[in-house]
Every structure is written in structure tokens, then in C-alpha cells.
């Protein structure tokens, strides 16, 4: 039975899973869901993803939700190429990097992007600016790391790169929306301000079949 993958276009969490599947060259049955209660909160989908969020997967009788848990599951069912390291030292570096992304940049990106995508810019300008400053600090750190390394936490692509990558184009898209000049700062031109991050993004984008993972509605 094919692995079933439930995802949403433009969801950075979904994109992580789609990228990992391509890196691991795994076959799967794709289920693109729309961001409607009808699709995400149906009884059938809630039995796969109890919070009614994407991504989620079904592998026979097994269901997994939460993007990073899914990446870890994929590693177990298809260990090569290794994404979570092969030695205790490699694993600790990869997990440390993943936890830093989750704890320090991701919540700020959500706060920042939410004000833009939910049309809350006028009432939540200060929140957006504070989040942007925190994001910029993290991007400076990440850029510095990538000045001396090919990938975030390992000699080759790892789960840390797959966790971070989708967040960068998502952020850039939010920061380049109309009327966001005042709150966007350096996020409007990540390529210019964070050249090592930009070069690293190009490496990820050169993964064979990367195009298959690109959010379809962003192409429209
Ligand atoms: N922590 C979750 C986040 C999943 C998530 O928030 N997904 C969003 C899309 S980016 C979603 O499905 N939102 C729809 C909803 O909450 O109704 C993960 O890593 O998978």
C-alpha cells in the first residue's frame, strides 16, 4: 500500500515533508488539501490528523502528524540517505539545529506572517516589528553559520536543512506583500542581506525534483 501524504500548498510544514520525500526518493500518494474546515476538519481527516492540520501521513494502519515527527518516521522506514545523522555527535548537532529553528525563529515567523496574511497589520504593527527584529537576529546567526559550512548541521543535507528551508521563501513572500515596507526591513531582500543563506537556498533548490515540492499556487 502506498504511503499517503496530506499537504497544503504554501504550508512550510507540508513543504518539509514533500522535500524529505524527494531527497529520500520515496513514492507516495499525494492528497493536496485546501485550507477549509470542510477539508481539514472532516471526521475522516481528523482521524489522520487530530488537530485538523497539514501535513500528515498514513502508512497502512499508521498515521503520523507534526512535520518533524513525520520526517523522523520517514527516516525509520527509509533510512537512506540519512537525514538525522549516523553518529551521536552528528545526531546531536542536527537536533540542536532543529530545536533552535523551532524555538527561536519559527514562532517569530508565525507572528510576523500572521499579521500580514490575516490583514492585522494596522492593529498589530508593533508585534510584527518586534517579530521581524527577532527573525533578523536569527538570520544573522544562521548566515554566519552558513558562511563556513555547506549545510546547517552536517557535511551533507540533513533534516535541519529540510526543517529550515521552506520557512525562508515563506518569509520572503510575506515580506514582499503590498504595504509591508514599513515592517519588513531586511526581510524584503534576503538574497542581498543574507548571501550565505541565499547560496544555501540555491543548493536546496537544486535537489532533483525540487520543483515537484514547490507550492503550486505560488506559481499561478
Ligand atoms: N506544528 C505543526 C504545524 C502544522 C500547521 O500549523 N499547519 C497549518 C498550515 S501551515 C494548518 O494546517 N493550518 C490549518 C488549521 O489550523 O486549520 C507541524 O509542524 O506540522
Image (cartoon, rainbow, N blue to C red):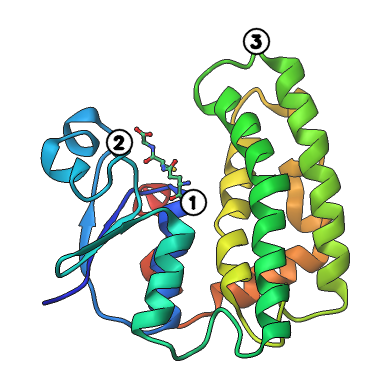
For discs 3 and 2, the disc positioned in front in the rendered view: 2
The quadrant where residue 173 appears:
top right
Residue 114 lies, with reference to residue 205, above or below; the image says above
Q: List the single residue furthest toward the front.
A: 88
Write down the residue under mark 3. 122
Give the spatial CA distance, label 2 vs label 1: 14 Å
Classify mark 2: residues with Cα within 10 Å, few (<14), some (14-19) or many (20+): some
- State the residue position of label 2: 35
Where on the image, by quarter, is ligand 1? Answer: top left
| In the rendered image, the vertical position of residue 19 relative to residue 186, given as above or below | below
Outermost residue on the top side: it is 123
x and y, in percent, of residue 117 in the image: 51, 27
Q: Does the residue labelled 2 lie within 8 Å of ligand 1?
A: yes
Residue at left offset 25%, top offset 80%: 27
Disc 1 within 8 angstroms of ligand 1 (CB): yes
Say left or right for 68 vs 129.
left
Task: Give the answer, above or below, for where 47 lies relative to 177.
Answer: below
Identify the image quadrant of residue 43: top left
Q: Compute the Cα span from label 3 to label 2.
A: 24 Å
Residue at the image position 68 percent from the left and 37 percent from the top: 108
Residue at 53% x, 18% y: name it. Answer: 119
Q: Look at mark 1 in the image and give the residue it sits on.
A: 12
What whole-number distance in Å separates the C-alpha atoms at marks 3 and 1? 25 Å
Amino acid at each position: 500500500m502506498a504511503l499517503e501524504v496530506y499537504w497544503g500548498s504554501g504550508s512550510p510544514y507540508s513543504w518539509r515533508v514533500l522535500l524529505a520525500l524527494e531527497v529520500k526518493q520515496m513514492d507516495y500518494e499525494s492528497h493536496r488539501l485546501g485550507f477549509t474546515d470542510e477539508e481539514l476538519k472532516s471526521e475522516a481527516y481528523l482521524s489522520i490528523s487530530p488537530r485538523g492540520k497539514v501535513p500528515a501521513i498514513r502508512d497502512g494502519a499508521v498515521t503520523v502528524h507534526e512535520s518533524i515527527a513525520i520526517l523522523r518516521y520517514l527516516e525509520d522506514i527509509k533510512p537512506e540517505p540519512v537525514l538525522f545523522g549516523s553518529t551521536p555527535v552528528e545526531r546531536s548537532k542536527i537536533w540542536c539545529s532543529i530545536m533552535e529553528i523551532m524555538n527561536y525563529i519559527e514562532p517569530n515567523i508565525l507572528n510576523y506572517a500572521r499579521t500580514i496574511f490575516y490583514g492585522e497589520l494596522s492593529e498589530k504593527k508593533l508585534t510584527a516589528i518586534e517579530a521581524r527584529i527577532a527573525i533578523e537576529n536569527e538570520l544573522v546567526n544562521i548566515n554566519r553559520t552558513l558562511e563556513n559550512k555547506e549545510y546547517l548541521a552536517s557535511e551533507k543535507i540533513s533534516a535541519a536543512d529540510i526543517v529550515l528551508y521552506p520557512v525562508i521563501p515563506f518569509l520572503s513572500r510575506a515580506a514582499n506583500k503590498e504595504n509591508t515596507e514599513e515592517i519588513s526591513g531586511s526581510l524584503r531582500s534576503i538574497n542581498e542581506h543574507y548571501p550565505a543563506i541565499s547560496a544555501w537556498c540555491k543548493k536546496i533548490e537544486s535537489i532533483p525534483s525540487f520543483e515537484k515540492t514547490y507550492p503550486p499556487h505560488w506559481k499561478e
